[in-house]
């Protein structure tokens, strides 16, 4: 803790503050967790981040070249303060569009480390609510949704690591006094479309295969997918694909935006696990474009067309 070694309780208190977080490498070394949660929760966060790696590689066909930072905040108040900025900490807003308010994970597109010279660290951020009255029965740790939030944030960090907006970030670093981060230029530089980026995050969050599910007690390894599809079923069923592709999130419509995020995960679930050959082939073409620097926009359009052409197979897959 700075220059001191403290006992566990005091160390957890020290690291509970933004910019004094634990920095904990995951066992695989693919992720590095920056966390204000207690040490034992931070270790769980690192474990859950590691579980996403296989699916992320499947989704994108390419892996980052260095460890990926994932930020985990210890409660809603700190999470919101980190997103919107804190003048007392010298922390400007780390996101511009306010989407942190519609989910428990967001991408910090305008996060610059307050050092000299400034360093860009756009990455996935999530909340593990240590004051939650709900307890995860598998770990006895508050907030059973924390592990899902970490999974989503890890996926957002991964996507950024393989699809950086180098030109926009370089310009921002060369003009540290500018009024606002140029988020429109930042996002227009991306190769991975927003619907797929968020959809992959949601897949890792709530559509994953769980090899640790206790099947002897009746739990399916696909319990997360079943839970998520049931949420959609009870909310009126799938939205038109074009609406999902548009991914128009609205910070003033939390329920609608949350459902859109969930349905993007549903669509990616069909891409990765639906075994529909035209969709599989289009997805392979998209991954090939990402790996080789090809025309990712054209490949995205090809994937969208394959999905639109195979809606019947999709509805069979989701049973809706």
Image (cartoon, helix red, strand yellow):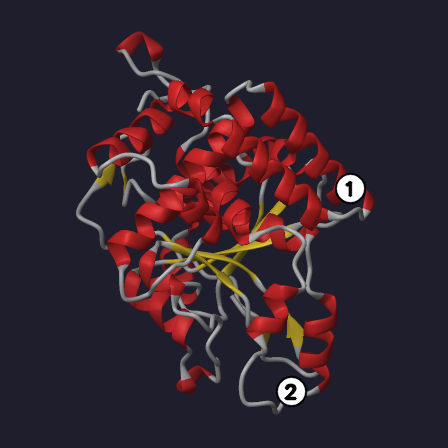
* Residue drawn 49% across the image and 68% down it: 20
**Disc number placed over residue 291 in the picture, else none:** 1
The image quadrant that residue 275 belongs to is top right
Spot the residue most to the top.
216
Indicate whether 101 appears above or below 287: below
Visible in this render: residue 244? yes
Nearer the observer, disc 2 or disc 1? 1
Nearest the viewer among 101 and 302 is 302
Viewer-proximal residue among 10 and 282:
282
State the image coordinates of residue 172 (x, y, percent, origin top left): 67, 80
Residue at 46 percent across and 53 percent down: it is: 246
Is 279 or 135 nearer to us in this picture?
279
Q: Which residue is mark 2?
A: 176
Q: Give the position of the C terminus as an image quadrant.
A: top left
**For residue 121, above or below residue 155:** below
Where's residue 123, x and y in %?
A: 56, 59
Callout 1: helix, strand or loop?
A: helix
């Amino acid at each position: 803790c700075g220059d001191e070694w403290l006992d566990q309780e005091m160390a957890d208190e020290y690291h509970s503050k933004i910019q004094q977080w634990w920095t904990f490498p995951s066992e695989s070394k693919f992720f590095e967790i920056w966390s204000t949660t207690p040490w034992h929760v931070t270790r769980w966060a690192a474990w859950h981040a590691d579980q996403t790696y296989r699916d992320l590689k499947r989704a994108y066909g390419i892996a980052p070249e260095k460890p990926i930072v994932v930020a985990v905040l210890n409660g809603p108040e700190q999470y919101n303060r980190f997103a919107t900025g804190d003048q007392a900490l010298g922390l400007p807003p780390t996101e511009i569009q306010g989407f942190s308010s519609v989910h428990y994970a967001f991408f910090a597109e305008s996060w610059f480390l307050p050092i000299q010279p400034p360093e860009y660290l756009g990455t996935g951020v999530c909340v593990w609510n240590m004051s939650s009255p709900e307890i995860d029965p598998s770990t006895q740790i508050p907030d059973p949704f924390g592990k899902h939030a970490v999974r989503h944030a890890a996926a957002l960090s991964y996507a950024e690591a393989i699809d950086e907006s180098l030109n926009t970030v370089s310009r921002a670093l060369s003009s540290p006094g500018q009024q606002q981060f140029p988020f429109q230029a930042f996002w227009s530089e991306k190769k991975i479309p927003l619907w797929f980026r968020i959809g992959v995050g949601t897949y890792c969050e709530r559509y994953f295969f769980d090899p640790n599910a206790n099947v002897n007690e009746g739990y399916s390894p696909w319990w997360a997918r079943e839970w998520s599809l049931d949420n959609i079923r009870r909310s009126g069923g799938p939205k038109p694909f074009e609406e999902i592709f548009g991914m128009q999130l609205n910070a003033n419509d939390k329920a609608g935006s949350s459902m859109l995020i969930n349905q993007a995960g549903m669509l990616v679930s069909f891409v990765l696990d639906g075994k529909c050959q035209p969709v599989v082939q289009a997805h392979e073409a998209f991954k090939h474009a990402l790996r080789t620097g090809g025309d990712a926009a054209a490949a995205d359009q090809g994937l969208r067309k394959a999905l639109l052409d195979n809606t019947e197979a999709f509805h069979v897959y989701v049973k809706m």
